[in-house]
Structure formats: structure tokens, C-alpha cells
């Protein structure tokens, strides 16, 4: 309708792939529903992602790009973002926060000039809630995770664990399921993470003052937690995902993240030759670092399982064992660099996913209908892992691993990896067959939710109605 096409949304993503990619997908989704969107980002830090954005923009004239700049000088952030190696480190995080604060002025100049109807901004831009108040428009938060994780984080803040040891399990109170955690699986409240917690608390305070939260998830995936978030935590929220479904199958027009290190047709050709559900995809996302010792254990496990695999090796320092590549020539495809992940996970031949449980990966795994080996490392990955293993029961946990401020994994042995991979790949284990069946059911649900009349489709309609109503009342 008339009203809907004139609605203008400003999207302000945080410059990390796990936040930028789903927001670019969201821009495509919004455009498909007649909304006009402008993505605001910084030219200096976004140069790695400018292709993603540029291609999104070329896809439809409904999407525009506006760049703003960090204030130059002391505390300038680009090196921090360019090198996410120690993003949790106090000093780097402080510099990052300071630099992000310098974006407020140019961001507000843009809002004043363009007068959008709402701001959808990342949780890491807490001050945008002040901007929205100044211009009397709603600020909507994008956290980059799902409802389950949002509920778990909130409950842990409200009821900090009282167990005496780091490895003693405790049940998080007041949630729809009795979810067990140990303190090792959570970031520690200590000096080392002082700035991290400051950032998290600022984000939570700003979220409480925001108009609502837009979530890349769908109702059928985590219904109890959608309800808990709305009814118990009393937050306004809209589920509009999986947003990756809007950009898939148009790779020529839209590059998700970086240009793939492998020719996509070649990758598909390789997959075509493998039986349905026979391939496990192994990737740890864009931030987690895998030490050589763990690369070795993973390699040995894949070889021992005698399974087909695609393994994404991101860093040059992730060296493979001597002779491994040659021995695995027929069974394994090793991608050194960026993988066309959404494309791979959606392929018939892929049946399993060894993942660090970044939310985008989990959701792309769900919409690909694959069973998962959940190997969380940091951030809210442990929450996402519990959803996969304990609630959805579409995966197995890699076992007793610790939350790592250095974003690396450690100490997981070949036998453990081997057992987990064999289970999800249904190699003679009933448990795995049931998981794979449930995963395939979720895949179907993930497709219908975004179709006309589906739950995510309808919730986006509500979102559009809500921001229009806000505008008409103000
Ligand atoms: N991704 C990709 N190719 C790669 C690595 C990552 O396409 O080689 C994409 C992946 O599909 C997902 C995002 O990058 O959309 C990573 O986000 P996620 O939340 O899974 O993990 P993070 O990198 O933030 O830890």
C-alpha cells in the first residue's frame, strides 16, 4: 500500500560478519516487502564488507548506503575491527567503545537530514536509543542471536549462579526447560572481562529503553522462548527469520561476506557426486581461532570416521597434518578462506555440521536440515549450543569445553570428535537418526515460516504496522 512504500528504515549494523551479514539479508527482506532502507556504516572499517553491502544495494533500488566516519585521532577503532584476534581484551574493547561513541554525531546529522521512520541498530550502538528519542522515532535493537539465548542471558543476569565450583552443574531458574550450565560455560565476572561486561550492561540498559527487538529466528523453532521473551520478560519483539533465506540462490547478485575462496559451481559439482546426507560441513565461523593441536585432532577424527567432509580452514596458521590433504583427496574438500556456507548447508548431500554455534551458523544449519556437533567457544555460543542439543535435540555436544576470552578452543581429543561426528552422521547410531529426522522437519518449518501467511512473514507485517502506527501517533 501507499503508506508501506513510504516507510523508511535505517539499518545500522555492527561491523563484524556475524552482525553485518544478517542485517544485509534483512535489508533485502525489507525491500521485498516494500520498505525503503538505508544501511549506515563507516567507510574505513566496512571496506571488507562494502562488497556485501554494495551487492545488496545493486540488487534493489529500495536500498541505499550512507557512510559516516570515526573521528580521527586517539582511540580510532579501525585496527581493532580489522584484527578481531583479541576483541575481548580490555584495552582493545575500550578503544573500540570510544571509537564507536564518536559515530554518534555524524549518525545524528544523517538522521536529522533523512528523517527516517525508525532505526534498527545493533546492540553495540547503545547510544542510538538517545538518537531515536531526540528525533522521536522508535529504536529497534538487533542482537544477532535467538530468543532462547536472549532468555538464558537475562535469567543468568537475574539469578547469578551460586554453585561453589566452576564445573558443578546448575539449573537456570525460571525458564521453560530445566537448562543446565556450569560456570565454566559462561564468561567469568572478573578483571580480565571488566570492559566486556561494561559493554554488555550498557547494551542491556539501552535495550530496556528501546521500542523493541527484531530477531533473526522463527516461532516454530523456539516457541516457548518467543513467548517467555514477550510474556515473562515483557519485551516487544518481532521474529522475521531465517533471513539467510532471502539472499540464498542469488549469489551472482549478492555476496554474503567475502568472495568465496572456491568457485561456487565447482563446490556444487563436488557435492553432486556425494550421496544424500553423507557430507559433514566443518566451520568455526569468522572469529574463533583453532590452534594447531586442535586442527590435528579434528583431522584425525575426520580421517578415522571415513566420512565425506567440507572443512573450512580460515587462518594460515591452521596447518593440517603432513599428508592429510593428499590422503583425503577423494573424501574431503578443504576450503582455505571464505566458504559459500549458506549454499553448502542447503545442499542435499550435506547431512551434518560441526559448528562453533554462532547464531547465524546454527540458523543456517537449521534451514539446511542438518544435524550438528555443537562445539561452542565464546560469546553466546554456549547458549545456542544448548538450544541445539538440549531443547531441539538436533545435535550432540562436543563435551566439556570452556568459555574462552581468547576465542580459541583447546583440549578436545580425537576420540571425542570422532564419536560426535559418527553420531550426527548416523553411522550406526539410532540416536543420530532421530536427530537427523528432527532436523529435516525443522528445515520444512523454516521454509514455510517466511512464505506468505507464515509466522515470520506475519510478524514482519506486524513490525511494519507497528512502526507506521508509531509514526502516525507522533
Ligand atoms: N560465513 C560464510 N563463509 C565462511 C565463514 C562464515 O559464509 O567461510 C558466514 C556464515 O554463513 C554466517 C556468518 O558468516 O552467516 C558467521 O556468523 P556466525 O554467527 O555463524 O559466527 P561468527 O563468525 O559471528 O562467530
Image (spheres, rainbow, N blue to C red):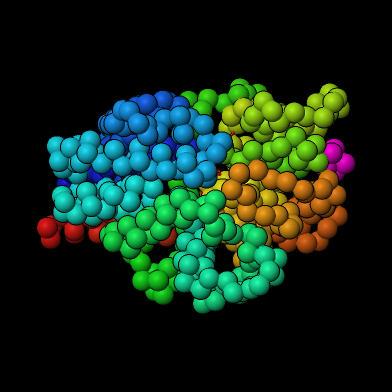
Residue 168 placed where, x, y %? 70, 70
Report the number of numbered marks. 0
Q: Is residue 149 left or right of residue 28?
A: right
Ligand 1 visible in quadrant: top right
For this rendering, which residue is in front, 204 or 55? 204
Q: Is residue 468 left or right of residue 251?
A: left
Residue 362 placed where, x, y %? 58, 50
Q: Residue furthest front?
A: 191
For the point 41% across and 30% down, the residue is 78
Residue 442 placed where, x, y %? 58, 57
- Is the stretch drawn in magenta largely helix, strand or loop? helix
For residue 446, above or below residue 257: below
For the point 68% across and 69% down, the residue is 165
For the point 61% across and 41% down, the residue is 288
Q: Is residue 443 magenta?
A: no
Quarter holding the C terminus is bottom left
For residue 54, above or below residue 235: above
Regarding residue 74, the answer to whether it shows in the image is: yes
The range drawn in magenta is 300-306
For the point 52% across and 45% down, the residue is 88
Amino acid at each position: 500500500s501507499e503508506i508501506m512504500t513510504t516507510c523508511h528504515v535505517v539499518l545500522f549494523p555492527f561491523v563484524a560478519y556475524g552482525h553485518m551479514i544478517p542485517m544485509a539479508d534483512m535489508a533485502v527482506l525489507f525491500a521485498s516487502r516494500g520498505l525503503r532502507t538505508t544501511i549506515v556504516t563507516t567507510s574505513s572499517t566496512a571496506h571488507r564488507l562494502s562488497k556485501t553491502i554494495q551487492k545488496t544495494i545493486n540488487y534493489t533500488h529500495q536500498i541505499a548506503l550512507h557512510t559516516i566516519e570515526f573521528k580521527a585521532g586517539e582511540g580510532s577503532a579501525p585496527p581493532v575491527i580489522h584484527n578481531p584476534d583479541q576483541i575481548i581484551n580490555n584495552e582493545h574493547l575500550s578503544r573500540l567503545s570510544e571509537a564507536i561513541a564518536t559515530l554518534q554525531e555524524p549518525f545524528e546529522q544523517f538522521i536529522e537530514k533523512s528523517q527516517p521512520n525508525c532505526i534498527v541498530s545493533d546492540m553495540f550502538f547503545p547510544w542510538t536509543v538517545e538518537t531515536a528519542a531526540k528525533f522521536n522515532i522508535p529504536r529497534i535493537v538487533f542482537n544477532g542471536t535467538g530468543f532462547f539465548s536472549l532468555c538464558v542471558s537475562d535469567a543468568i543476569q537475574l539469578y547469578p549462579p551460586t554453585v561453589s565450583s566452576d564445573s558443578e552443574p546448575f539449573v537456570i531458574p525460571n525458564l521453560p526447560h530445566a537448562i543446565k550450565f556450569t560456570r565454566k560455560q559462561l564468561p567469568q565476572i572478573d578483571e580480565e572481562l571488566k570492559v566486556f561486561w561494561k559493554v554488555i550492561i550498557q547494551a542491556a540498559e539501552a535495550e530496556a529503553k528501546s521500542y523493541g527487538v527484531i530477531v533473526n529466528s522463527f516461532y516454530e523453532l523456539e516457541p516457548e522462548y518467543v513467548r517467555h521473551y514477550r510474556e515473562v520478560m515483557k519485551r516487544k519483539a518481532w521474529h522475521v527469520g531465517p533471513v539467510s533465506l532471502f539472499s540464498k540462490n542469488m549469489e551472482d547478485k549478492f555476496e554474503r561476506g567475502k568472495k568465496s575462496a572456491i568457485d561456487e559451481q565447482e563446490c556444487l559439482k563436488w557435492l553432486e557426486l556425494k550421496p544424500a546426507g553423507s557430507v559433514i560441513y566443518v566451520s568455526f565461523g569468522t572469529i574463533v581461532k583453532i590452534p594447531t593441536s586442535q586442527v590435528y585432532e579434528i583431522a584425525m577424527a575426520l580421517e578415522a570416521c571415513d566420512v565425506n567432509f567440507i572443512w573450512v580452514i580460515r587462518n594460515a596458521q591452521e596447518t593440517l597434518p603432513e599428508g592429510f590433504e593428499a590422503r583425503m583427496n577423494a573424501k574431503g574438500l578443504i576450503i582455505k578462506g571464505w566458504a559459500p556456507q549458506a549454499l553448502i548447508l542447503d545442499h542435499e548431500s550435506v547431512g551434518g555440521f560441526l559448528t562453533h554455534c554462532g547464531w547465524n551458523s546454527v540458523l543456517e544449519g537449521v534451514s539446511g536440515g542438518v544435524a550438528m556437533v555443537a562445539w561452542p567457544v565464546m560469546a553466546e555460543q554456549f547458549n545456542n549450543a544448548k538450544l541445539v542439543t538440549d531443547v531441539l535435540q538436533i545435535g550432540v555436544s562436543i563435551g566439556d569445553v570452556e568459555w574462552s576470552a581468547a576465542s580459541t578452543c583447546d583440549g578436545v581429543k580425537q576420540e571425542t570428535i570422532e564419536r560426535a561426528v559418527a553420531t550426527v552422521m548416523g553411522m550406526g547410531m539410532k540416536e543420530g537418526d532421530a536427530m537427523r529426522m528432527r532436523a529435516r522437519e525443522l528445515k520444512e518449518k523454516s521454509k514455510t515460516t517466511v512464505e506468505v501467511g507464515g509466522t515470520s512473514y506475519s510478524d514482519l507485517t506486524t513490525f511494519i504496522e507497528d512502526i507506521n502506527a508509531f509514526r502516525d501517533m507522533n
